[in-house]
Amino acid sequence: MTKQNIIIGSDHGGYHLKETVKHWLEMNGFTVTDVGCDSSESVDYPVFACEVAQRVSRGEFPRGILICGTGIGMSMAANKYRGIRAALCNDLFCATHSRAHNDANILVMGGRILGSAYALAITKEFMNTKFDGGRHRKRVDQIMKAEEKWGKK
Ligand code: RB5
């Protein structure tokens, strides 16, 4: 596993899982920037999605992690940003393929769906799996071209 700088964020629905994932990343040699939230008090998930997505989009971090209750809102918000391929992975199969086929740069998980052990397995898989390239490169490029056509932040 290549150790990277990772940016992580959650809302209240993902707060506890974020703390667990952050701890695991730090114990495994990653440098983690946590943009919040800082408790299980109710907050708005787009605030955290936008900060993480913007900073990955600008190249400040190679990868990010976002966690809300389901992962749905976080992925919707993060995918509004240029160059972002945020993948909602609430299972291992999707984690593997989001990297191998889609070259995802943000992992999104549902804190109200996943148990900690499985979420850590997903995180590890996401961090370990390389993009396959080849025919998948062409398809990812097609997504990125669509982004140019419509314009994003
Ligand atoms: C918050 O209640 C919940 O809506 C949020 O965590 C997330 O699941 C949104 O998609």
Image (spheres, helix red, strand yellow):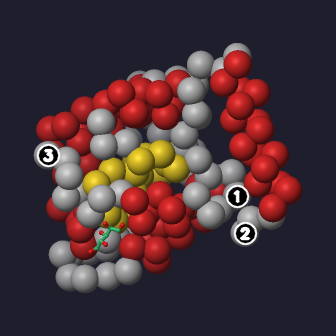
Q: Can you tell me which quadrant of the image ligand 1 is in?
A: bottom left
> Does the residue at mark 3 contact the one at mark 2 (Cβ under 8 Å)?
no
Q: Nearer the viewer, residue 17 or 62?
A: 17
Q: Where is residue 138, by image quadrant? A: top right
The x, y position of residue 87, in whole percent, is 47, 45
Tell me the kind of residue under disc 2: Lys
Q: Secondary structure at mark 3?
A: loop
At a point 27% along the width and 63% down the height, the residue shown is 69
Residue wearing tag 1: 82
CA distance for labels 1 and 3 = 31 Å
Residue wearing tag 2: 153
Q: Secondary structure at mark 1?
A: loop
Query: Can residue 43 be spotted in the picture?
Result: yes
The x, y position of residue 39, in whole percent, is 20, 76
At a point 33% along the width and 51% down the height, the residue shown is 109
The yes-or-no answer for disc 2 within 8 Å of ligand 1 is no
Residue wearing tag 3: 115
Q: Nearer the viewer, residue 103 or 61?
A: 103
Q: Left or right of 148: which side holds 19? A: left
The x, y position of residue 57, in whole percent, is 65, 57
Residue 16's place in the image compared with 1, above or below, is below
